[in-house]
Image: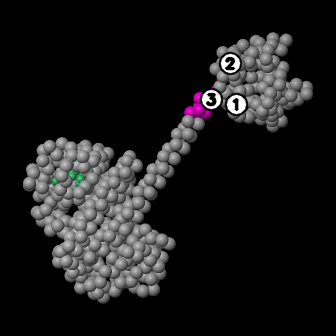
Amino acid sequence: MQQDEFSDPFEVLESVELAVIVLKVGADGLPRYSAINSKAREFTEFEYKDFAGKTALELYGGATGRRALNLHLSVIESRQEATYDIVLPTEHKPKNLRTTLRPVFNDQGAVVYLVGSSADVTSEMERDEALELTKMALEKAEEASQAKERFLANMSHEIRTPMNGILGMCELLKETELNEQQALFANTIFNSANALLSVINDILDFSKIKADKISLHDAPFSLLDLVQDVGTLLWAKAAYKGIELRTDYPEEMPREFVGDASKVRQILMNLLGNAIKFTEQGNVTLRVSFNESEPGCPLRIQVSDTGIGIDKEQLSWIFSAFEQVNRQVTRVVEGTGLGLAITKALVERMGGQISVSSTPGQGTVFTVSLNVKPLEDGDPGKQAAVPFLQDNRKALRANSGTSALDLKPEELAGLRVLIAEDNKTNQLVLRKMLKSSGADLCFAENGQLAVDFYMSSPRDLILMDLSMPVLGGLEATRLIRAHEKASGLAECPIVAFTANAQPSDVEACLAAGMNDFLAKPFRKIELLARMIQHAKGGVSHWAGAPSE
Ligand code: ADP
């Protein structure tokens, strides 16, 4: 009879896409199924005869039954509709039903029926679960990539620090009285250590590129500063070989761009590094230009040299990884053959192109065009673009004028220098390199000691390692700058020793308030030049002052 009671009004519900259930509240207060429509039968896989007159506990049994009955009872008790998710253990795969259950009252206000409508949210929940899993996987991958990045940064530091010791000591050894055989041994150590260093640099770069699959971090940056910084970093390398390093940055060209500055820096470092490596006399020139009529890749960078050149056959493979090692039976210069492959990958990742033309015996020109746009007034970050660093450095450059090759260590006599460096060998290298200068040196073994020392005893110049125990160089610099500001003191020039001059390190140094940076391992002339310029109040030694 129950079926008849509901069959007519319920017929309408048979065609509804939602599952509908009706429970009648018995005299004992328990709600029992009295009708379910076809969709509900499909979801539950029950027939009318299975559920009619049963409570949820009797129908499903176990935990599902108990939970459903409790939910039904709580709606009767609260007299309010409720929405809940319930998992039905159907024969095939479990179904997630999102149900809204409403009480129906009689004239006396007692709950006599419960009417529920349910939708199958299994696929929605599966999608949410899949999304959650994907998110977790992405987070894990991101963590792994960050771990790799940290590992590479640490490795870079750990490798370069002892290399600084080896190269520094060797350089000092070469300056002592040596007989012919000893000089040969010292030169061999020096050249081998340099070769090892360039292999390490390439491998670290290459693995980094593999590790993060070249993610780009676009932000406003000053291209002019970047060009000058690269000139600063490579100046000593060129000066050491007696070749001139020039840069050409047209006056009218925009200075601020939006892009990944560290990648542009790396491209320039690789191309200029090669140009210097393969040039014995003459010059290496870096020219940048901007062509608005080429909207795809308006920024052009050209690195030309007057070096040994590249023959036609070699031109066809120089951009392939490891090729120089594979192809050249007799190699004139050390190298891994990774530099140009890295450069090409970076250029292409930035939507650009790289090409080369060369005349053996006369020189080579590498041309890179990049999809890097100038900073527009409306760009987000325009206000924050190249914060105080640019001004900071401009002020220092304004005092240029010393010839790089004309170094007089005596100019450092009496200069009060604080050196924050935890590595004992490097302390010794610095002590020896600066011995003849007469500079007044004092060493701090970590950043905290450096800050404490500086606060109690003013200095003219601070050389600051970045990675130190207790307190790192960046933190120490921030504390020193804060102290100077609070006490109304003039800023003492701080030169960072960066283990890795390529990526964001340099930006981080300048952002922390440092004025300059010296890539480890450094040469004695590089150190002296940097110190002399700061002693005179400006960094100008790089041979890249925009060429006449
Ligand atoms: P490597 O670490 O061997 O220098 P690269 O990928 O940077 O690796 O360069 C590959 C090869 O291309 C070099 O070994 C060299 O033979 C040639 N090459 C690159 N740049 C120049 C250049 N400016 N002048 C002459 N040869 C060059």
Residue position for label 3: 122
| x then y, percent, for residue 266 | 29, 56
Considering the numbered disc 3 on the image, is that residue within a helix, a strand or a loop?
helix
Tell me which residue sits at (59%, 32%) in the image.
126
Please indicate, yes or no, whether residue 408 appears anywhere in the rendered image: yes
Label 3 packing within 10 angstroms: few (<14), some (14-19), many (20+): some
Tell me which residue sits at (36%, 65%) in the image.
160
Considering the numbered disc 1 on the image, is that residue within a helix, a strand or a loop?
strand
Q: Sequence order check: which comes first, mark 1 or mark 3?
A: 1
Q: Amino acid at mark 2?
A: Glu
Q: Is residue 15 magenta?
A: no
Considering the numbered disc 2 on the image, is that residue within a helix, a strand or a loop?
helix
Label 1 packing within 10 angstroms: few (<14), some (14-19), many (20+): some
Q: Which residues are magenta?
A: 119-128
Q: Are marks 1 and 2 in contact (CB under 8 Å)?
A: no
Q: Nearer the viewer, residue 315 or 231?
A: 315
Q: Amino acid at mark 1?
A: Val
Disc 3 from disc 2: Cα separation: 14 Å
| x then y, percent, for residue 162 | 37, 68
Tell me the tag on residue 26: none
Q: Nearer the viewer, residue 330 or 471?
A: 330
Q: Is residue 126 magenta?
A: yes
Is 125 on the left-hand or right-hand side of 231?
right
Residue position for label 1: 87
Tell me the tag on residue 42: 2
> In the image, is the residue at mark 1 within 8 Å of ligand 1 by its beta carbon?
no
